[in-house]
Structures are given as structure tokens and as C-alpha cells.
Amino acid sequence: MKSLTEYLKFNIKTRRASVNITQQIENLVKKSKIKEGLCLVNAMHITASVFINDDETGLHKDYEKWLEGLAPHSPTNQYEHNKTGEDNADAHLKRQVMGREVVVAITNGKLDFGPWEQIFYGEFDGRRTKRVLVKIIGE
Ligand code: ZN
């Protein structure tokens, strides 16, 4: 069995953003030389997500609006977690909804996506360096 482990770094200048990381993951699959296997991609921070969906600008605005409706950033004093001195309770909740990781099958050396599937890094409390783990295993 072959494997490849890499860490992607992100330093998003805004509090929230989603970044299409599909090409970066595809490059790592190529680098791994694995033809049949699995690719795990997970956020290593509890205020960020990795998720799969369509790369359509309107949809990502809809996510932003929907998540902000579910867990508004302000007023920050509405959250118990923020009594610790943090202001990112909403980011923890948004991350829970959008998920921690994705696993994509590798078939014939390529990510085996359904129609329109793309991989995104979802940031909910940016302006600092965060990491994403990519682990690819197979043969
Ligand atoms: Zn926190």
C-alpha cells in the first residue's frame, strides 16, 4: 500500500470565506501515484470545515446567509462559549453544520466525483493560519 500525507496552509484575511481546493487535492493525488484508493481531506481546526458542493457563486452566498441565520456572529454575548473571552462561538456552530472532512474515492488515478462536485475549505473564524490534512492511501 502507498500513502501520501500533506498539510495545506490557509491564512484567510476575512472572518469567513469558502475556497475551492479541488485543484490542490488533484495535484496531490497525481503526486501520490495512487491509482485506486481513498483521499481524506479534513480541517484541523474546530472553526473551519472541508465540504463538497457546487462551485457556484450564488450558492456560496446562500450558504453564508443560511449559516448567519442559524448562528449569527453578533451579538457575541448571546453565546455561553464567548464568556471564555472568545468571540467565535458562531464559528464553532457553523463548522458543525458544514462538517469536518470529506473522503473521495480515487479511481484510475483521479478523484471520482459526482456531477459538479468540488472540494471547499470553509473558514468561519479567519485572520490566522490554519491547516488542512490530506491523506491519500491506496495502490
Ligand atoms: Zn472558540
Image (tube, rainbow, N blue to C red):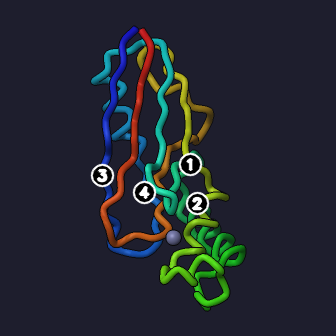
> Badge 1 is on which residue?
100
Q: CA distance from mark 4 to mark 2?
A: 14 Å
Confirm or deny contact between disc 4 and disc 2 (CB under 8 A).
no
Residue 8: give x, y in percent of width and height: 32, 46
Q: Amino acid at mark 2?
A: Arg
Q: Amino acid at mark 4?
A: Val
Question: In this picture, is 94 found above or below 87?
Answer: above
> Badge 3 is on which residue?
9
Give the mark, 1 or 2, whose residue is nearer the N terminus. Answer: 2
Give the mark, 4 or 3, whose residue is nearer the N terminus. Answer: 3
Circle 2: element type: helix
Give the mark, 1 or 3, whose residue is nearer the N terminus. Answer: 3
Looking at the image, which is closer to me, 61 or 131? 131
Q: CA distance from mark 4 to mark 3?
A: 12 Å
> Badge 4 is on which residue?
19
Label 3 beta carbon less than 8 Å to ligand 1: no
Report whether 15 appears left or right of 104: left
Q: Amino acid at mark 3?
A: Lys
Residue 120: give x, y in percent of width and height: 48, 50
Give the mark, 3 or 2, whose residue is nearer the N terminus. Answer: 3
> Badge 2 is on which residue?
95
